[in-house]
Image (cartoon, rainbow, N blue to C red):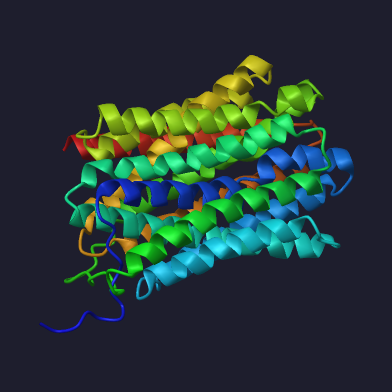
Amino acid sequence: MSPPSELEVPRLIGAGPIVVVGIIALAVAMGIGRFAFTPLLPLMLRDGAIDSATGADWAAANYGGYLIGALTAARAGRHIVRELQIALLGVVVSTVLVAFMQTPFAGMALRFAAGVFSAWVLVLASSWCLSELAREGASRFGAWIYTGVGIGITLVGALAWFGGLQPAWVLWLELGLLAAIGTAFVLRAVAQASRTAALRSAPTQKGPDPGHFDLVICYGTFGFGYILPATFLPALAREQVNNPLVFGLTWPVFGIAAALSVAVIARSLSTSPRRRVWAAAQALMAVGTGLPAFTRSLWSLALSAVLVGGTFMVTTMAGLQLARELMPANPTRLLARMTAAFAAGQIGGPVFVRLFAMQSDKGWDEISFVSAVAALFLALSAFWLWRVGRG
């Protein structure tokens, strides 16, 4: 028997530890690395730490970093565990340092880095966890790892809500501590697994790459649509009630809806075709994205948070699981391609808002227009996915 390759992925015994590692990794990377800025932006504006223009620049930097991370993640996979560890540590460092940033440019650089590392964790953790669960004969548990994103968003939103009277820089330190605790758990679990198995790269996909460009485009449309409420909901709520204990609730609601929706789908619709699940979620997201285009009352913003929060991780889960089904030998390339399209779409959302804002002095009208356009695209892509899934 030949010795194991030095590039072999560690095997965990049983599905439970794999799912827990995936949940925590995604909670750290996405809940903190990607989305922490959303609930903290109104508080940083309140403290005078940044202005609205700088906030937009920071958000754009994170989106750009996420795109670069998604594009480069396609080249990862030879040392998946090592790269996953580096990416998680990168999220911790880039989060903590925001509390000490001295210039707006430094903040942009840190948010860019957090975006890169977050994309790496999403692609690598998804690829590794889904592959390991398949080896354990427990693929049915794959959906549960995506509850980590909603759990992370909920924790961050709750921290910003309960601690909203603290200075924003203190909250960044507290988030960095949360990220460090979660990362330490993941590193320890992986290190224990590594004692019993060497590292192995995922097998390469044989034959021509079919591309699956329709999925890539639909996933990019998802990024364009969801980012508008995900970016602007807390700020829109702050326009209605200037109290962090009120407008700060929108983000925890968003996260709770994300976690519960994935749990419900994982439990009740685990055998449903992923393409049909994706289509239904994207259709509901279209409704939630379009709501702020017509009314800005608190009830409509709360409903938007529930509809978008309750579908964006279902869409993520269904899309990435579908990629795994279509390219079972090694889904990393398709996962990265879809994530890159998603990142490009989410960059486009705020960019269009800014472009229309330059040509209008009517307050939030630019958000209304772009939200309506995004809702239309989401509805069309949902129709396409459902139609193809029926066939």
Left or right: 283, with 385 as reference point: right
- In this view, the residue farthest toward the left is 1
Q: Quadrant of residue 297?
A: top right
Please provide percent x and percent y for residue 178: 61, 48
Which is more toward the observer, 208 or 9?
A: 9
Q: Residue at x 24, y 67 (%)?
A: 209
Q: Quadrant of residue 198?
A: bottom left
Is residue 216 visible from the viewing direction of this image?
yes
Left or right: 325, with 33 as reference point: left
Please provide percent x and percent y for residue 24: 47, 48
Left or right: 351, with 171 as reference point: left
Is residue 65 visible from the viewing direction of this image?
no
Q: Quadrant of residue 165?
A: top right
Left or right: 107, with 50 as reference point: left
**Residue 124 drawn above or below residue 160:** below
- In this view, the residue farthest toward the bottom is 2
Which is more toward the observer, 129 or 338?
A: 129
**Residue 215 drawn above or below residue 61:** above
Mark count: 0
Q: Residue at x 23, y 40 (%)?
A: 388
Please provide percent x and percent y for residue 118: 53, 57
Which is more toward the observer, 231 or 248?
A: 248
**Residue 44 drawn above or below residue 371:** below
In the picture, the quarter occupied by the N terminus is bottom left
Q: Residue at x 39, y 47 (%)?
A: 20
**Residue 388 drawn above or below residue 108:** above
Q: Residue at x 71, y 65 (%)?
A: 109
Please provide percent x and percent y for residue 51: 85, 47
